[in-house]
Structure formats: structure tokens, C-alpha cells
């Protein structure tokens, strides 16, 4: 049973949130088909409450990004991966909402602001603006951008804390342990190990998991009874074996809980951490940054919900997309907090791997951190989006390589553009070939049949992979059809079929190739919306015929008008 509304004198001024006059994921005047190739984020709002009992949108989130340092290519990957999944849902005709934002509290922020000689408020605003800029530059179609310094979020966090306290899940006690400022968490003795600082030669202690320095700390703070949540979490995992994907990460989470959980320190002394949300009724303590941060996912869903309006929220999230380094917080702590208050849990968590360079972890000290803004400026936004989702790691780390970006551009994207350019050549007539197909078509030989059968099955295969959240292989499956089509064109060489009696044979080849290019490109829209849109424009595919239902062979009987001799390279040579 859900706990009753909190009665707490420290929170009497808090205003419960009810439904706004407009839903956040409003399609406005932009049709679903125009959004497929749009590079502009929808109008954003602070919450995703619905005005009526409409069907809940597909609610997907990135983690909120920590603003203590500039964005890097890992942030770009998370944004692009999440956006591609959101766009896929819209591509399928499903209303979807993407939430991203910034995590703006904690000791690291406090220290970074001091180092830069500015107030924390100024420092975090600059950081939030950088991440907004990154999302917009990368064509990330986010609907909400949450900041943990907002009044709405502060109210939600303090209300959530009060509900936990009222339900008996919080107690105050002395806490001693190995604390990492970098990770902003305590580690048990079994989770740390001795090491040597390479720059000073001094003996240090580090986290086995992250390699960051830890120091022994002893202080009084508040604790959450995480140790009592083990059985409930394991029961939930057993009933929901796909809660964490990929499966290997699910096993990691499950085994961690099976080993036993310790109670979790969920506050820090204000004397050490002043930049954060105060504990209600105790100004000497500041709420733990991870409890604060995780609540963002329900803040934007209108929490705390006014009685009777819970059904208007987009919560629970359909998917949290996170890096593997923060999976513990999302798959153990977050469900435990929600279970404590009998609140719905997110439906699924996708834990992706990281990017390395030359198979080494990226770090500022090694000088191998990639600036995502520079990369997008150098290679193009959609080129980087394609590279990220094609080569990014889900199960294992992806190795970032400028040479591989160039190779993907030349061997994948330029081939797609060149194939489209060929079928739009002055020698060929797509509308004539198309009309011949729809009037009965031709007798296909074995080579034709092989390509056509592949085209007929590609959309379903890509769909199955996307349902499994296997985005890299979904992209590769769509591109496999393009490679097959390019090979088909080379083998059949329709440009040599110039005699009048060969015209029908030429039309057959051109239609099969153009149809395969059309299907490939329709399927690529969630991953590179602008360039896919340009290829479809080149083929003169109507905006209303670019949804998933048109990724079937022979489903578009109007494309190709005015394409004869259409010039202009969608993927021109890269400048050196």
C-alpha cells in the first residue's frame, strides 16, 4: 500500500503538482513524419503530466550528466543511443518522451566551482548550458531537460525523503568507511585495495571498481535500510529477468545483491557538503547526491503527485539508458528506494559499455579525451551519430578511432549516397520502373529473388533487434541490405542495357535497387535523421510515407517522381 500523504512541518510549504494544461510530449503542428527527419527538439516543459487519461507515452531517459567537467564523447554516445531508441518508437507510430538533464549538486561541484573562482550557481548554469548545447548539436530530440537545482526538483527530493522517513526506512547513526570524493560514495573494505600514486609515489587506497582514490571517513549521518531490501530486490529480479540488459549485466547486479547489502549512507554533514538539498528538519545534513539525482526521473513526471492524479504521470519509465559504471545506482539503489514507498519501478534498464582509445580508458591525464563538439564539426553530426550507434559498445567497450570514422563514412555512408545517385541517373526512369512493377512486374531470376527476399525481411529483422535494444546490430542489419543492393547494381550493370528491347530488364533492376535503397534509408532515419531525410528527398519519397509501415517491399507506389538526373551528393568527400 502506498504511504499516505506526508504531514511534516518542515515541508508545509511544498505544493503538490497536478496536471498542466498541455502535455509535455505534444506533437503540436509537427506531424509524426516531419519529426522523423527533424533536427530540432520539441518544445520542452518541466513535467510530463498528461491533461487526461491518455495513453502513457514511451518514457525514456538518459542519466543526468554531472557538470563538474566538460562533456566528452561518452556523453554524446549516451545521448545519441537514447535518442535513436526514442526516434525508433516515434518511427513506429508510438508517442515517446525523452528526458535528459544535469546533476548539479555534490562535493565535486562545490570543489570545481571554488577552483574556478565562481559561485556554484554560476558554475552549474554554465555546465547545464553546455550539455543542452551538446544535446541540441547532436540532434537529440529531448522533451524535458531537468536540473537538480530547480525548485521543483528540490521539493520532490525533500518530499521523497519525508515519505521514506515516515515509513521508517531512515535512521541516524555514525558511519565509518572508505569514501571516494570522485565517486561520491562509500566503499566497504572488500571493495578497496592499496595502490601507489604514479605522480607522487605515495601509497594510496583506491576503489577496485573505479580506480579512484578513497580516504577513511567517520561521521554521523542518515542511513537508508538497504540491507532489508535484498529479498524484495531478488524477488523482483527473478520475476523480471529482462529488467537489466544485456544479460551479463543483469547477472552482475543480481550477484551483488545475493552477496548481501549494507545500509546506505544517504546524507553528508553540511560542514563538508553545503552545495546540495538540505535534509528536511535538519540543516546540519545535506541529502546524498545520488538519492537527490535519481529522483529526477519522477520529478519530471510531476512527483509528488496530487491525490487522484497519479494516473496522469508518464511514470514508470519504459527505459533508463545508463553507462555500466552507474548501473549499481540505477539497478539496486533506485529500485530499493521506490520499493520502500510502494512506487512503480522502471520497466527496463539498458546498461551500455564505454569508449576507449587504442583500447585504453579515456582520461585527461593521458590526453586521449575526445571533444564531441569538435568531432561533430569535423565529420558532421549524422556521421558521428552513425558511427556512435554502429560501433558503440553495448556488451563490450567500443574503441574510438578517427580512421574508423573515415572508413565508415567512405564504405558505408558514401556507398549509400552513391547507390542513390546511380538509380537517380539521367539514363534511368524510376517512375516508369515503379509503374511497371505495380502493373504486374517482371519475372525475377535467382539473383533478383535473393535481393528482393532480403529486402522483404529486413524491416522485421531490424525491428526484432531494436526490441532487444541491440542498436548496433540493428543498424548493421539495415546497412547489410544497402551493401547487397550495391553489389546487385555492380553485377547487373543496368547502365549497359541501352537497347530498346532491354528497357524492361533495365527497369526491373532499377526498381529493385531503388526500392532496396528506399527501405534501407527509411529504416536509418532514427539513427541519422538529417542525412537519411536527404536521401529520401533525393528519391522523392513523400514525408507521409517514411514511417515503419513503409519499410516493406512494394509499399510506396508514388516515390521517384522527378528523380531522373537529380544531382547533388548527399555524402560528399570529407575535407582533409
Image (spheres, rainbow, N blue to C red):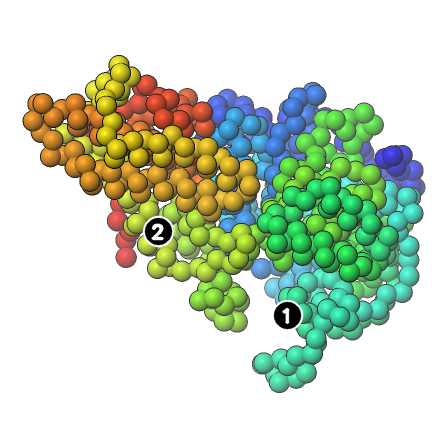
**Can residue 523 be seen in this snapshot?**
yes
Judging depth in this view, the residue of 41 and 297 nearest the camera is 297
Could you tell me which residue is drawn at 14 percent across and 34 percent down? 495
Farthest-out residue, bottom:
201
Judging depth in this view, the residue of 322 and 159 nearest the camera is 322
Does residue 561 appear left or right of residue 2 in this picture?
left
Could you tell me which residue is drawn at 51 percent across and 48 percent down? 134
Q: Position of residue 162 (x, y in %)?
A: 86, 44
Q: Position of residue 456 (x, y in %)?
A: 38, 30
Measure the alpha-carbon separation of dots 1 and 2.
33 Å
Which picture quadrant has residue 476? top left
Q: Which residue is mark 1?
A: 211
Looking at the image, residue 21 lies above or below residue 287: above
| Label 1 element class | loop
Could you tell me which residue is drawn at 17 percent across and 26 percent down? 505
Looking at the image, residue 437 lies above or below residue 287: above
| Label 2 element class | helix
- Picture quarter with the N terminus: top right
For label 1, the crowd category at 10 Å Cα-Cα, with few meaning under 14, some 14 to 19 and many 20 or more, is some
Does residue 377 appear left or right of residue 51 in this picture?
left
Q: Which mark is residue 353?
A: none
Which picture quadrant has residue 324? bottom right
- Picture quarter with the C terminus: bottom left
Q: Which residue is mark 2?
A: 408
Farthest-out residue, front:
446
Q: Position of residue 217 (x, y in %)?
A: 80, 71
**Can residue 158 be seen in this snapshot?**
no
Amino acid at each position: 500500500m502506498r504511504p499516505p500523504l506526508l504531514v511534516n512541518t518542515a515541508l508545509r510549504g511544498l505544493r503538490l503538482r497536478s496536471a498542466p494544461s498541455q502535455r509535455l510530449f505534444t506533437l503540436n503542428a509537427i506531424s509524426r513524419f516531419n519529426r522523423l527527419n527533424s533536427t530540432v527538439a520539441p518544445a520542452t516543459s518541466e513535467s510530463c503530466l498528461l491533461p487526461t487519461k491518455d495513453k502513457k507515452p514511451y518514457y525514456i531517459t538518459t542519466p543526468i550528466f554531472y557538470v563538474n567537467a566538460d562533456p566528452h564523447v561518452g556523453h554524446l554516445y549516451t545521448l545519441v543511443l537514447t535518442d535513436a531508441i526514442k526516434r525508433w518508437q516515434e518511427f513506429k507510430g508510438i508517442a515517446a518522451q525523452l528526458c535528459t538533464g544535469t546533476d548539479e549538486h555534490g562535493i565535486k561541484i562545490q570543489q570545481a566551482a571554488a577552483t574556478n573562482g565562481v559561485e556554484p550557481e554560476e558554475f552549474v548554469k554554465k555546465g547545464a548550458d553546455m550539455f543542452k548545447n551538446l544535446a541540441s548539436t547532436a540532434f537529440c530530440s529531448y522533451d524535458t531537460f531537468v536540473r537538480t537545482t530547480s525548485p521543483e526538483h528540490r521539493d520532490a527530493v525533500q518530499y521523497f525523503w519525508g515519505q521514506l522517513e515516515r515509513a521508517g526506512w531512515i535512521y541516524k547513526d555514525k558511519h565509518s568507511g572508505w569514501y571516494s570524493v570522485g565517486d561520491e560514495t562509500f566503499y566497504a573494505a572488500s571493495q578497496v585495495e592499496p595502490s601507489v600514486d604514479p605522480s607522487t609515489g605515495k601509497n594510496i587506497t583506491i576503489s577496485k571498481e573505479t580506480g579512484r582514490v578513497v580516504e577513511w571517513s567517520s561521521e554521523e549521518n542518515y542511513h537508508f535500510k538497504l540491507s532489508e531490501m535484498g529479498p524484495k530486490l531478488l524477488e523482483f529480479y527473478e520475476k523480471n529477468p529482462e529488467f537489466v540488459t544485456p544479460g551479463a549485466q543483469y547477472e552482475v547486479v543480481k550477484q551483488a545483491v545475493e552477496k548481501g547489502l549494507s545500509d546506505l549512507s544517504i546524507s553528508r554533514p553540511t560542514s563538508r557538503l553545503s552545495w546540495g538539498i538540505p535534509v528536511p528538519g535538519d540543516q546540519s545534513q545535506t541529502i546524498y547526491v545520488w538519492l537527490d539525482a535519481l529522483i529526477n526521473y519522477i520529478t519530471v513526471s510531476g512527483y509528488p503527485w496530487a491525490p487522484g492524479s497519479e494516473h496522469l504521470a508518464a511514470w514508470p519509465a519504459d527505459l533508463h539508458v545508463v553507462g555500466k559504471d552507474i548501473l549499481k545506482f540505477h539497478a539496486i539503489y533506485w529500485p530499493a528506494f521506490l520499493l520502500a514507498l510502494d512506487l512503480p519501478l522502471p520497466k527496463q534498464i539498458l546498461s551500455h559499455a564505454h569508449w576507449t582509445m587504442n583500447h585504453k580508458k579515456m582520461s585527461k591525464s593521458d590526453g586521449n579525451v575526445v571533444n564531441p563538439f569538435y568531432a561533430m564539426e569535423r565529420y558532421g553530426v549524422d556521421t558521428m551519430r552513425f558511427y556512435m550507434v554502429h560501433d558503440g559498445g553495448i556488451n563490450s567497450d567500443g574503441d574510438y578511432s578517427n580512421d574508423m570514422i573515415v572508413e565508415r563514412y567512405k564504405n558505408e555512408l558514401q556507398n549509400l549516397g552513391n547507390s542513390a545517385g546511380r538509380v537517380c541517373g539521367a539514363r534511368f526512369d524510376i517512375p516508369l520502373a515503379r509503374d511497371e512493377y505495380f502493373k504486374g512486374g517482371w519475372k525475377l531470376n535467382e539473383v533478383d529473388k535473393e535481393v528482393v527476399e532480403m529486402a522483404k525481411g529486413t524491416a522485421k529483422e531490424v525491428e526484432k533487434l531494436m526490441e532487444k535494444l541491440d542498436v548496433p546490430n540493428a543498424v548493421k542489419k539495415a546497412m547489410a541490405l544497402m551493401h547487397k543492393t550495391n553489389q546487385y547494381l555492380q553485377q547487373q550493370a543496368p547502365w549497359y542495357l541501352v537497347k530498346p528491347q532491354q528497357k524492361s530488364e533495365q527497369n526491373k533492376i532499377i526498381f529493385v535497387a531503388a526500392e532496396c535503397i528506399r527501405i534501407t534509408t527509411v529504416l536509418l532515419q532514427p539513427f541519422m535523421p538529417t542525412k537519411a531525410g536527404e536521401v529520401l528527398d533525393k528519391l522523392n519519397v513523400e514525408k507521409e510515407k517514411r514511417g515503419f509501415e513503409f519499410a516493406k517491399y512494394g509499399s510506396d507506389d508514388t516515390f521517384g517522381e522527378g528523380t531522373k538526373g537529380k544531382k547533388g551528393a548527399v555524402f560528399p568527400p570529407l575535407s582533409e
